[in-house]
Amino acid sequence: MDFIDLHVHTNTSDGLLSPKEVVYWAHKKNLAAIAITDHDTVDGIDEALFYGEKYNVEVIPGIEINTDYKGSEVHILGYYIGYKATWFKDILKKISSARFDRAKKIIEKLDNLGLEITFDEVLEISGEASIGRPHIARVLVNKKLAYNNKEVFDKYIGINGPAYVPRYKITPCMAIEYILKSGGIPVLAHPGLIKDRAIIEELVENNLKGIEVFHTKHNQDMVKLFMDFAKKHDLIITGGSDCHGVFTDGISLLGSLNIDKKYLDILKTEFHI
């Protein structure tokens, strides 16, 4: 049986590995295909495609767009997106610019709490990546101002934290529209992490094409729940590890869910890819 992983991040967003390294590890793990789904950026796709050919790993151009629904984060995955379209890149640039502004405001709030870090220190961690809260967390951990990223989010920069700053808001329906316009397939990411399940029904009515049934944080009850939901609403079934590096808490996530390649084959057949 061939296995796939359709939810993978690189260091062009908040992952630890370069696109080349991600593809290399996919090859080492004998994965048949992976999808590069960085947050609000497509900067890692070309490099991943190049090394996908070299290592004989099918690479699917994708994205994970962070959106807001009634104050809660909802992530929309896009597969086989037309990532080179100028209009699409312009939208992502606007999101990226807002990320910079948000990071600066978070750093200012942290400073007021006595946690002194600089924007340059965060940029040094993020490099060319789409800047985000995980980069801020890493600086705090590196400076021994916190034990780990989880502590940073729980105590300071999570949604209920004193240094939290709301994101530039794109709605899930807007993300679906952008992905469809680019020629891609919009899929709801990790629905098990969404508190208000009413959003899922609403998105189905607004051209959502698939749902991420298999995810690292989905237990067996969730898998069954969303599998049944997908079948009821005729949605494509996908899955991925949401890998941000080779190891997380000592566990190798890339390809760890052993997702059958048949789900990718069905997606391709359904959308004539």
Image (cartoon, helix red, strand yellow):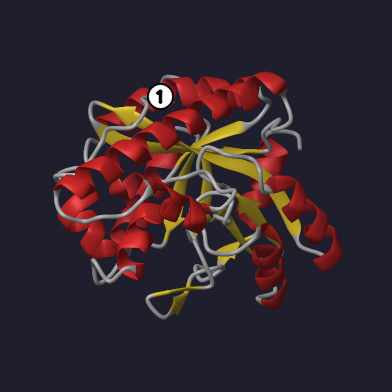
Extreme bottom residue here? 250
The amino acid sitting under disc 1 is Ile
Q: Quadrant of residue 105?
A: top left
Total tally of numbered discs in the picture:
1
Residue underneath mark 1: 170
Residue found at x 78% / y 59%: 52
Q: Nearer the viewer, residue 220 or 147?
A: 147
Q: Nearer the viewer, residue 50 or 222?
A: 50
Q: Position of residue 189 (x, y in %)?
A: 43, 44
Residue found at x 71% / y 62%: 20
Quick check: 262 above or below 186?
below
Quick check: 111 above or below 88?
below
Extreme right residue here? 54
Helix, strand or loop at label 1? It is loop
Q: Residues within 10 Å of mark 1 (few under 14, many from 20)?
A: some
Residue found at x 24% / y 59%: 152
Q: Nearer the viewer, residue 41 or 96?
A: 96
Residue found at x 44% / y 19%: 206
Q: Quadrant of residue 148?
A: bottom left
Q: Position of residue 251 (x, y in %)?
A: 43, 78
Q: Position of residue 149 (x, y in %)?
A: 31, 63
* Quadrant of the snapshot with the C terminus: top right
Q: Position of residue 262 (x, y in %)?
A: 65, 56
- Tell me if residue 218 can be seen: no
